[in-house]
Amino acid sequence: MNYTAEDEILIESKWQDLQRSCEKICKSEEDWNFIKRAYFLAKEAHQGVRRRSGEPYFLHPIAVAKIVVDEIGLGVKSVVAALLHDVVEDTEYTVEDMEHIFGKKIATMVDGLTKMSGVFNADTSRQAEYFRKVLLTLSDDVRVILIKIADRLHNMRTLGAMPHNKQIKITGETLYLFAPLAYRLGLYAIKTEFEDLCMKYRFPKEYEEITRQINETSAAREEYIRKFNAPIIEALDRNGIKYEISGRIKSVYSIWTKMVRKQIPFSEIYDLFAIRIVFQPLEFPSEKTQCWQVYSSITDIYTPKPDRLRDWISIPKANGYEALHSTVMGPDGIWVEVQIRTQRMEDIAERGFAAHWKYKHSSISHDEDEFDKWLKMIRTALESPTQNAIDFLDNFKLSLYTSEIAVFTPKGEARRLPYGATALDFAYDVHTKIGNKAIGAKINHKIMPITTTLSSGDQVEIITSESAKPKAEWLEYVSTSKAKQAIKNFLKREQEHNHQRGMNMLEERLAQLNITPNNRVIRKLTAAYGSNSKDELYTKIGAGIVSLDNLEKVIKTNSKNKILKFWTLFIKDNDNDNEDDNPTTTHKENTPQPDSREQLAVAECCHPLPGDKVVGYKDPITHQIIVHKASCDELNRLASQHGECIVKEEIKWSQLKTQSSLATIQIKGIDRMGLLVDLANVVTNDFSINMREINIHTHDGIFEGTLSLYVRDAESLNAVLDRMRRIKGMDTVKRQLN
């Protein structure tokens, strides 16, 4: 089907917008002709194809190209690749055609952006393989990743037309990989928009409510910012500094995550905004000196909080970010964060990688090797023969640090690690062999456990032993991808050895008892010895965790029937599903059938309660549907790797409230006589709830602890929490999050 007259008008309008954006990058007629050739070929190739929203599909590559030039700051070749990024995937054109028409570089970029096709192994995630392929292009051209981010940004902006399960899949991918990747490449504005859009579609009610409250408080907030800025403006003007000063509101997503994490209402979020000062530096003295001069002017007016000074000028972040951040006490006793940066630093903060390379050759940037180091690390991971696509994706995710510390070797060499890294992470960062043999560390010349969390500025020396070897529990104490992968590789080799040894031991012992090791026997032994699979059973036997001394007794013991109860729900079939955002048919919503029920298992990672917003994930091995909280981090990981396993139907709890679920509450406050009595009255008298366990300890007049209660659902739990908060002396009452 050809474009309609309305389509042509709409496409022409968007094309004119793109051309206006390209004026700043096109230096010659040749540049313009290059872009026009790509435009007309893509327009013809996508003719008749429509998105789920009904609009011409060709509007999508135009929008991606505009993001590439306007919001990321890339050039002509990137615009051409963006216009062509879906041509090979969705039309008859091939990569060879692209090379013939546009040259080898464009063909390589388009190929990197083209989704993988063909046959995949049963244990391989198609999505993970696709991400791995895209990331392989890091070795040649980082622009491919940047265009992919632009592609994902436009898809997120138009996500409303997609069905519920696809929204979960796409938002999961975005939160798990694309938002951290955007951050790692310095695209802060895009990272923030990714997170906000994910929240908008995952939690629409909460998103709308926070947005409403932000708007309602805007007048008072703007007045405070004017009051706060007035003396700073006067000081900067007096010193003859050319600057721009602005107040930046926190994102909806960051406000919401803080509310959830601390379980506090919007009214108790006091750091809703930050003040940003961007100035034009003089030729002399250095940028760094001038930033500190501006900082001095501000601290002459407002008292700084000593532990909230962040100097990312002396040691920039690995993504190139440079700035001074300080938190000062403003009028009315309110802490306010102030960000100080030059115009060059602002460009890098806003445009990320593209701006970094713009300034790299000017010898101004102090971190010109940091991207190269990171890319080298990624290339090494990609070339690892031991990693499948899923392992690689998990490890790559770990490399996208959200915050960093700088620690030093005994010789004074600075090394960057993620915030929360341990001495064990440091050991593996130096060398895998050192990590595998580590037994302790000297931190600032004091002997400390290898699991000690490091702080910025620590000097670390690793103590090793030839008899040492990695343990499974080490995985809980490391944060870096290099450390996790090294430990996993060692444990995998050891597990394979134990698996074979355990299988031989069991077969030999069963033979002595004249018992055939059939499936029934193995299943019985697996359950009896607390294993989830026969492979786990073999490994435990081989490692000496499981003893076969009582094997005969176990075999003769009759199994007890176990009755498992699951919540039931009505299934709502929303659409017929379509994987790609390409030509679609109109889907008719089916009427829910009252007898349509599924058996579900509650996820162990997040323990959702009835009433929590949940999403179903069908395990590709067991085919069991596992119910996760919609905000679960593990769900985002699964959605990014096995998005096809997200249950299409929206999962809702049934109205049955005969079952109780265990929930743990964290409490803290001022200790006093009668506190436990008041707590007990709330739980037993006010709500008639059974209490499983209570653990409270006091120190220096402060109490803190946990209560484990059996509750019907999330609604009843929230009612208990609200009532507990009104107890005299209570400071913090919140649900413990898994």
Image (cartoon, rainbow, N blue to C red):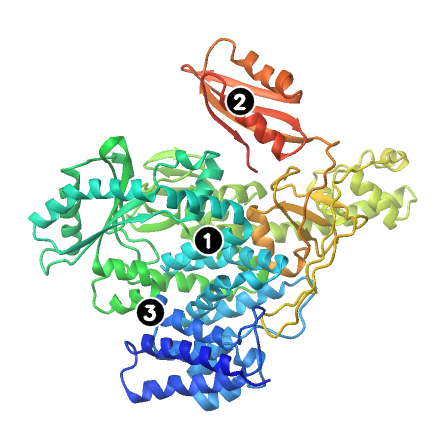
Residue 366: tell me if it is visible.
Answer: no
Residue 75's spot in the image, x, y percent?
34, 76
Would you identify the image quadrant in which residue 30 lies?
A: bottom left
Helix or strand or loop: what does disc 3 sit on? loop
Pick the residue in front: 571 or 371.
571
Pick the residue in front: 705 or 230.
230
| Residue found farthest to the bottom | 100
Q: Is residue 38 above or below residue 580?
A: below
Q: Which disc is residue 195 wearing?
A: 1
Residue 207's spot in the image, x, y percent?
48, 48
Residue 71's spot in the image, x, y percent?
36, 66
Sooner in the amino-acid sequence: mark 3 or mark 2: 3
**CB under 8 Å between callouts 1 and 2?**
no
Pick the residue in front: 145 or 11.
11
Q: Which disc is residue 439 wearing?
A: none
Spatial CA distance of label 1 from label 2 is: 32 Å
Residue 14's spot in the image, x, y percent?
41, 76
Kind of residue sitting beneath label 1: Glu
> In the rendered image, which quarter contains the N terminus?
bottom right
How busy is the neighbourhood of tag 3: few (under 14 within 10 Å), some, or many (20 plus)? many
> In the rendered image, which quarter contains the C terminus?
top right
Residue drawn at point x = 52 percent, y = 87 percent? 96
Q: Is residue 715 above or below residue 23?
A: above
Circle 3 sits on which residue? 73
Q: Is residue 49 above or below residue 266?
A: below
Circle 2 sits on which residue? 724
